[in-house]
Image (cartoon, rainbow, N blue to C red):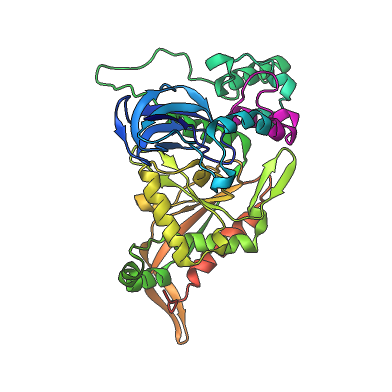
Amino acid sequence: MASIEMLMPKMGESIIEGTIISWLKKEGDLIEADESVLEVATDKVDTEVPATHGGRLKKILAQEGEVVKVGAAIALIETSGEASSAFPSASSETETTQEEWKQELPVLTSTLLEEVPQETQAAADGRFYSPLVKSIAKEEGISFEELSKIPGTGKEGRVTKQDMWDYLSARNASTSSVENTPLFPSSPSLAPSLSGSDEIIEMDRMRKLIAQRMVESKRISAHVTSFVEADMTSIVLWREKNKEAFKAAYGEGITFTPFFIEAVAKAIRDFPMINISVEGERIIKKKDINIGMAVALPSGNLIVPVIKHADRLSLVEISKKVNDLAQRARNNKLIADEVTGGTYTISNVGSFGNVMGTPIIPQPQVAILAIGAIVKKPAVVETPTGDVIAIRHKMFLSHSYDHRVVDGALGGMFVRRVADYLEAFDLETAL
């Protein structure tokens, strides 16, 4: 028998820690390799973590609610074989044991810290700062020296986002008597209006995160929305004609979402200044076109998985990614890399029967497109023999954009171009 340490896995490029939400197995349980044994939360996503080895869960080393750094031991698994590393090497000749990996970790960490600015070093003052806290500090122009002086109320004295809001409110109040209202005020301290039939529901972790980000975005970006109506008749007819053949050929259905993503990706290539982010007074123009799609979860919350390099994918490839990401999102199987790196986002409000909406921009992006329900409408259609009234499948596109950097001309032309691509879809397109 041998005991093998199960380590906190790396769940994304910028993720350096995770919070243990719950253990799905208890000490003494038999587990199989790749079987989910715990649920971990990061700043980006909640996900289940599979066992690195099969055997018996001998000891849980990290308790629920505990924040654990990537690479730290979280459990001991008792196996029937000899002890081996939880990080197998590419070849037996270059095999690195788990103990050697631990010894090298400080060196690797030191090297990485030398390559980043002082403000982003997590432990330069002996404290760890989460990506969210560092993001707030950067946005508000708080230097690392100033950040190190902010009192932390979190575990082990860590600075939480609430600590940041409290600090900013106090700083703004002392700067000017006119600006004595907190950026993120809490609810008014009035007597609660409750009756015996009312139910008090505590927000879950994801809802709190969504709420914070929505308020943050409205504070940061100057939201403007433009609307365009698109004729979806060709796409509706093509999908109706080919959906059974598509399912037979690829083993899954095709929704309207891949058509939207394809059209948006094409429009971004035409108008690359939509594919940007803002950093202080600088505009960052993104080379990659990574399109996020909002997915409603069974809990009622939303998550936005990202389709990377959408402009390089065919309609079939986009469809496969859409189906895969949506299914795994609803089953809480996404990893952090799959919900980060988005440069533009779409939200299909039409799936709930809504004809249009005014979506909030996900930071640090500068635009988001809401797609309304496709409905039959009478419309004037031009024909070689004159105009006629015909039944067409129509849909509203609602384009919200950050007016700090996207003017009405660009925001309006972009959404019009998306509609043009949708309307120009070829009915003869092959599967």
On whether residue 136 falls in the magenta region, the answer is: no
Image quadrant where one finds the N terminus: top left
Question: Where is residue 279 shown, x and y percent of the image?
Answer: 70, 40
**Residue at image point 51% right, 39% down:** 87
On whether residue 127 falls in the magenta region, the answer is: yes
Question: Where is residue 299 shown, x and y percent of the image?
Answer: 34, 37
Q: Using residue 279 as the reference point, say whether residue 205 is left or right of it.
A: left
**Residue at image point 57% right, 62% down:** 311
Q: Is residue 363 above or below residue 135?
A: below
Image quadrant where one finds the C terminus: bottom left
Q: Using residue 147 as the reference point, say whether residue 41 is left or right of it.
A: left
Question: Where is residue 266 shown, x and y percent of the image?
Answer: 57, 64
Q: Using residue 241 as the reference point, say whether residue 319 is left or right of it.
A: right
Q: Is residue 69 above or below residue 308?
A: above
Question: Where is residue 120 shown, x and y percent of the image?
Answer: 69, 30
Q: Using residue 31 as the reference point, say whether residue 42 is left or right of it.
A: right
Front position in the image: 1 or 21: 1
Front position in the image: 231 or 259: 259
Tell me if residue 409 can be seen: no
User: Which residue lies most toward the left here?
Assistant: 197
Magenta segment: 110-135
**Residue at image point 66% right, 16% down:** 150
Tell me if residue 96 can be seen: yes
